[in-house]
Amino acid sequence: MHDKKLLALIILVTILSLGHTVDHIARGDLPWPLSVSSLPSVIITVAIYAVLGFGLYFYLTNKVGPGFWAIAAGIGVLFGWLAHFSPFTDQTPQYICSAYKTPAIGWLALIWLVALMISLIVAGLYAEYLWARQPQRR
């Protein structure tokens, strides 16, 4: 049986991730038509939504449990940190804020990213809690 709170967190992460993808498109990180230089970004985006989509399907059909979501959220937090908050990135919060003509839109994009990161952390911690509570299988 799936946990309704975890399911709600996964849906929230998915919605926030979609909004963050729109932000990347608006900033020109995923230009149209696609080029060879945008291929890594496209592959990463498709992989993220494949994990979310297939993960939701398999979770709702009881093929995966909270352990899957704990690991997926942990990877998501790590990837988000490396992509936007580490010293090794060019997609910093300052870049996001300054990428738009209107500062308010840049701040909205940054707040959306922070909300995504917080929701990933909460979903991951909650999934870990549920995973730890499961009876051990032999």
Image: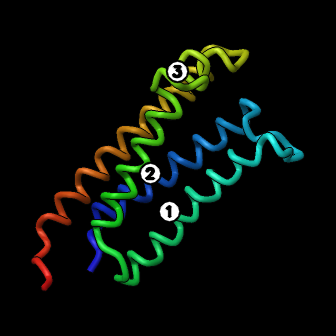
Whether residue 76 is visible: yes
Q: Residues under labels 3 and 2: Cα distance?
A: 19 Å
Q: Position of residue 89 (x, y in %)?
A: 56, 26
Of the residues under marks 3 and 2, which one precedes in the sequence? 2
Q: Amino acid at mark 2?
A: Val
User: Residue at the location (62% across, 23% down)?
Assistant: 105
Name the secondary structure under disc 2: helix
At 51% from the left and 29% from the top, the residue drawn is 84
Please state if 30 lies on the left or on the right of 6 as rendered. right
Q: Amino acid at mark 3?
A: Pro
Per the image, the residue denoted by label 1 is: 52
Q: Which mark is residue 18?
A: none
Q: Are marks 2 and 1 in contact (CB under 8 Å)?
A: yes
Residue 93 location, x and y as percent?
52, 21
Structural distance between the alpha carbons of marks 2 and 1: 9 Å
Name the residue tied to disc 2: 13
Q: Quadrant of the C terminus?
A: bottom left
Residue 120 spot, x, y in % from top left: 37, 46
Q: Residue at x 40, y 43 (%)?
A: 77
Give the residue at x 57% y 65%.
50
**Local SS, label 3:** helix
Q: Dividing the image into 4 quarters, which one contains the N terminus?
A: bottom left
Q: Label 1 neighbourhood size at 10 Å, few (<14), some (14-19), many (20+)?
A: some
SS for callout 1 = helix
Left or right of residue 42: residue 104: left
Lower sequence index among marks 1 and 3: 1
Q: Is residue 104 visible?
A: no
State yes or no: discs 1 and 3 in contact (Cβ < 8 Å).
no
Model colouring: rainbow
Which mark is drawn over residue 93?
3
